[in-house]
Image (tube, rainbow, N blue to C red):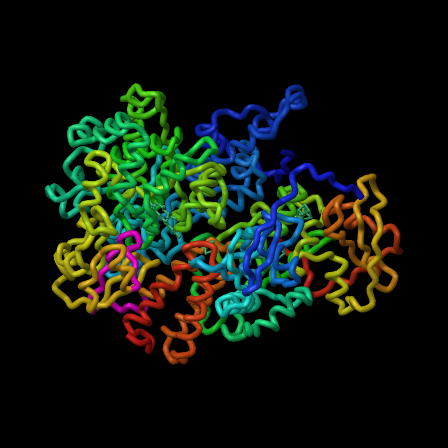
Amino acid sequence: MTHAVPIAPPRRLVELEIDGQKVKTREGSTLLETLRAHGQDQPTLCHIENLTPVNVCRVCVVEVEGARTLVPSCSRKAEPGMKVKTDSERVRHSRKLVFELLASSVDLSLVDARTRGFMAKYGVDPERFGPRAQPAAANQRDAAKPGHHHHPQPGLAATVAQPVKVDNDLYVRDYSRCILCYKCVEACGEDAQNTFAIAVAGRGFDARISTEANVPLTDSACVYCGNCIGVCPTGALMFKSEHDLRARGEWHESRQTVTRTVCPYCGVGCNLELHVQDNRIVKATSPLDHDVTRGHLCIKGRFGWEHVQPAARPARETDSTEKEPQP
Amino acid sequence: MDLHFTSDEPTADEREAVDALLGPPESSWRGGARDPHADTRHVDGGRAVRELRHLLLPALHALQGRRGWISPGGLNYVSARLGVPPADTYGVASFYGMFSTTERPPTVVHVCDDVACAPRGAEALCAELERRCGPAGSSQDGRATWQRSPCLGLCERGPAAFVQQAGAGREDQSLAPASADALEAVLRGREVPERPGTGSVPQAGSPELRLLTRVDVADPASLDDYRAHGGYRALRRALQVGPAEVLRELHDSKLAGRGGAAFPAGVKWKAVAEAPARPHYLICNADESEPGTFKDRVLMEQDPFAVVEAMTIAGYAVGAERGFLYVRGEYPEATRRLAHAIGQARQRGFLGANVLERDFSFEIEIRRGAGAYICGEETALMESIEGKRGEPRNKPPFPVHVGLFGKPTAINNVETLVNVLEVIAHGGDAFAGRGTAASTGTKLFCLSGCIEKPGVYEVHFGATLGELIALGGGVRDGRPLQAVLLGGAAGVFVGPAELDMPLTLEGARERGATLGSGVVLVFDDHVDLKPILARIAAFFRDESCGQCVPCRVGTVRQEEALARLLAGGADEARERALLAELEQVMKDASICGLGQTASGAIQSAIRRLGMFGGRA
Ligand SMILES: Cc1cc2nc3c(=O)[nH]c(=O)nc-3n(C[C@H](O)[C@H](O)[C@H](O)COP(=O)(O)O)c2cc1C
Ligand code: SF4
Ligand code: SF4
Ligand code: SF4
Ligand code: FES
Ligand code: FES
C-alpha cells in the first residue's frame, strides 16, 4: 500500500447545521460525506465512492433551507451556514416516492440489505400504481423510438420487464432489474475502463443501457473486465456462473465464504475477493477501498479462475436463459 | 482512443454526405482508406480528437438528411471520423426524435396533434390521412410515411405539418395550414410549395410596435432594408459606448429573460463578463418547443438580422468571440433565413474579424436541434451542442460560471436578445419606463386555439388577459370561453373568471400562474378538455430525457392515473391524491424544469377548473 504525501494545504473546515445540530466538515465535502462522517447514512442508488456522482436517482435528496427544490446530498457540496434537513416531510415523501416509482417499474429483489432497510423505513408500497403490465418481448424496448408515444395499457402500470440478455459465457444482462443509475456506463468509460462499450440509448421511460445498435456484447467493444458488474446495485449485471446457479435454485449465499487475495496474473497487485460456494469459486469481486484499483479489475482477475477448479458440471440450459436472436 | 467497430461499412452516399461537412478523412484511423505504410506511422488521439465531438449532431444530420436514417455503417463512419465510441454515437442518435436508427422511408410527414392544433381540426386531419394513406407509420411504396408529432411551433396556422425529406439536394419543409390534400400529395411523392409565413403578426405595421416593427415591412433577406428600418443602430451605439456601458444600460432596463424563467438579463451578462475563466461563450436559445409557442420562430423568419445584431451586441458585452445559435430542428425556414442573414452580415463586416473595423471579432454558428423539447433547457442545450445526449446538468454550478465546453456562458432566449436592441438604441431607463415597475418593456404573446385572429401579439406588460384576447378578435365565432392555457404545457389552465389577470410576471405569480414563454391558448365551450389533458401528459412522458427517476417514471405514472380518470369509473378522490403525490415528488426532486413543471397543467385543471371532482 502506498501513502500519498499531502502536498496541498490542509483543507479548512466549514460549519453547517444538520437537523438542528451544528456540525463541522472539511471544505469541499459533499453533504453525503458529511452526513456519513457523522454516523447518519442516507439511502443512495446511483452513488458509489469510486465513480463520479451523476445524481440521477434522487433517493438521497435532502432539504436545504432557502432552496426551491430538494438537493441531492451525494453531489451537493457542504457550504458554510447551510441548514440541512434529512428527515423533513418533503424529504421523506420524495424518498418514498422515488423508491415506489422504481420498485413499481423495476425488479428490485436483489438490492442490498441496506437499501431494503431504507425501503422499509419509508413505508414503500409499489403496488399502489396498479397491477404490472406484461413484460416486453426480447429486444422490444431496444427498438423504441424517441418521442414515439406508447399509450398506457388500461389499468396497468408500465415496467421495464423483459427477458434476460445472455449472449456470452461470462456475464448476463437482466435489464428488468436496471434502474438506469449510469454506473455501468461510467465504469466502462472514463471513470475506469475507458472501453466505452455501452451507453445510455433512447429517451424517457424508454431509455436503456445499450451497445451500438443493440448488437450482442460479443460484437461490441466489450473486453469483459466486469467492472460494470462490480458497480451494478441491483443485480442487473451478473456473472453467468451466479445467474445459472440462481436459475437452478442452487445459489446459497449462506453457504459462501469470501477469501481476499491478490490477483496472480500480473504485477499490478489488484485485490480479489473470491466468493466460494461448495468448494467452487462462483464469482470474483474487488474491494472498493483498495487503493490500487478501487474495485476495478480486468478480465483475468474477474473471470480467469476456472482453471483452478474442475470443469463445471455440464451446463444445463435453463428456461430463462435462452439465447436471443439479434434484432 | 482505440475504438472498436462492427463490420458495417458506410455507403458511398453516406461517406459523401459526411465528408461534405467534415472534409476528407486524414487517415484510415479516421475512416479513410487503409494504407499499411502510413497507418503504422500515425499518431492519433488526445485533445485534437476530443475537440471534434461537438460536430456529432451536424454529422448525424448529414447522414439522416442523405439516407433518411442512420445506418450502422454510417454510424461507424461518423464515429471513426470524430473519434467517438460507436455506442456513444448510438446513444446520442437514439435520443433525438428527428433521427432514426432503423431504416425508414426518406420522406416523413410529421402531423401535429398537439394542444393548439387539436381545436383546429388536427384529429380530423389525422383520421382523413389514415383513411387515404393508411395508418401512421405505414408506407404504401416505401418512399414516404407519416406520424403524429408534438407542437411544431406553427400554431397560428394550425393544423400544422413538418416534412423531413432525405436525399441529395432535398430539404425539410413546413406545411401550415396543412390540408389532407396537400399531405396526401407529399406522401404520393409530389412537390407541394411551402407557403411563405406572412400574416403571423396581425398588428404588423402598427406604430405601437417595438419588437415587431420590421415584420411584414422590411424584406427579411435584405441587409439594406434592415438598415433602412433602423437595423444596426444599436450595434454602432454599443461599440461606441463600450461593454461596461452596455451592461449598465441592460441593468437599468431591468429586462427579464423571456424564455420562461424571467431571470434578469443584466445580472446574467455581468456575471459572465466578470468571470475570470476564458473563453466566454454566447448562446441564443432558439429551440422553441413549448407547445403553443411560436414567437421566436416569427422573429427569426421575419427579422433574422435583428437576432444576428443582438447576438453580436451580447457577445461584445460579455466578452465572447463565438456565439452559437441553436435553432429548433423543425424550423427549416427560420434556419435558412438566419443562415442567409449571417452570411450577409459577415460579407458586410458586421460579423467576423474586426466587426465594423473595431477591435472586436465575433462569429455565429448555427446548430440545428434534432427533435427534443428538453434541449430548450439551457444546460441540456449545451450538452447537445457538445455532441451529447440532451440531458440537463445538475446546478450548481451555473452556466455563467461553468457553461458550454465548461466555460462561462451567457444563454438567452431569442425574444430576450431582440429586446436588447431596444434597450441599447433608446436607453435602459426608457425601456424600464414601459410596462410595470417589476415587468419592464413589451411582451410577445402567442395567441392560438379558438381565437378569431391567432398570431403573435406585442403588448406592454400590464395588459390583462381579457384585453389580450379582445385584441385577438375574441373567442372564435363569438363562443363562450371555457379556459385558457397560460404558459404552455408547462403552464397552467385558468378559467373565464380570471380574465382580469394582469399579464405581468408579478400579476401571474400572485395568482399562482405563470406567463412562461407567452402562450395564451384559448379553448371555447365546445372543446373537450379531457383529451387535451391526456395530450399534455403524453407530451411530458415522451419528452422526459429519462435521466432522473421522479420525471422518468413519474410522468408515466401520471399519464396512467390520468388515463384511469379519463376512462371513467375510477375512484376520483384516490386518483387525485395519487396525482398530487406525484406532483410533489416531481416538483421537489426532479433535476430540471421539465419534471418540475410536468404536473402543473393537470393540477390546475383539477384545482382551478374543478375537473375530476376537484375543487374549482
Ligand atoms: C424543459 C425546458 C424547456 C425550455 N425550453 C426553452 C426554449 O425552447 N427556449 C428558451 O429560450 N428557453 C427555454 N427554457 C428556459 C431555458 O432553460 C433558459 O432559462 C433560457 O433559455 C434563458 O434565457 P432567458 O433568460 O433569455 O429567458 C426551457 C426550460 C426548460 C426547463
Ligand atoms: S465488462 Fe468491462 S468492457 Fe464490458 S461492458 Fe462491462 S465495463 Fe465495459
Ligand atoms: S445495469 Fe446496473 S449499473 Fe447499469 S444502469 Fe442498470 S442498474 Fe445501473
Ligand atoms: S426532470 Fe425529466 S427532463 Fe429533467 S433531467 Fe430529470 S428526467 Fe430529464
Ligand atoms: S445517490 Fe444521490 S442522486 Fe442517486
Ligand atoms: S403547431 Fe400544432 S400545437 Fe403548435
Quadrant hosting residue B193: top left
Say which residue appears at 20% left-offset and 51% top-offset.
B436
Say which residue appears at 73% left-offset and 38% top-offset.
A5
Quadrant holding the N terminus of chain A: top right
Membership of B474 in magenta stretch: no
Where residue B77 sits: x, y (%)? Answer: 54, 34
Where residue B294 sits: x, y (%)? Answer: 27, 48
Can see residue A19? yes
Say which residue appears at 57% left-offset and 67% top-offset.
A103
Where residue B206 sits: x, y (%)? Answer: 11, 43
Q: Nearer the viewer, residue A273 or B11?
A: A273
Membership of B516 in magenta stretch: yes
- Side (left or right) of A35 relative to B321: right
- Side (left or right) of B116 relative to A238: left
Please state the extent of the stretch shown in magenta in the rendering.
B512-531
Can see residue A135? no
Q: Nearer the viewer, residue B290 or B161?
A: B290
Where residue A195 sits: x, y (%)? Answer: 65, 41
Q: Is residue A152 above or below residue B427?
A: below
- Side (left or right) of B363 relative to A175: left
Say which residue appears at 78% left-offset and 63% top-offset.
A316
Q: Nearer the viewer, residue B595 or B8?
A: B595
Quadrant hosting residue B6: top right
Q: Is residue A256 above or below residue B84?
A: below
Q: Is residue B588 above or below residue B36?
A: below
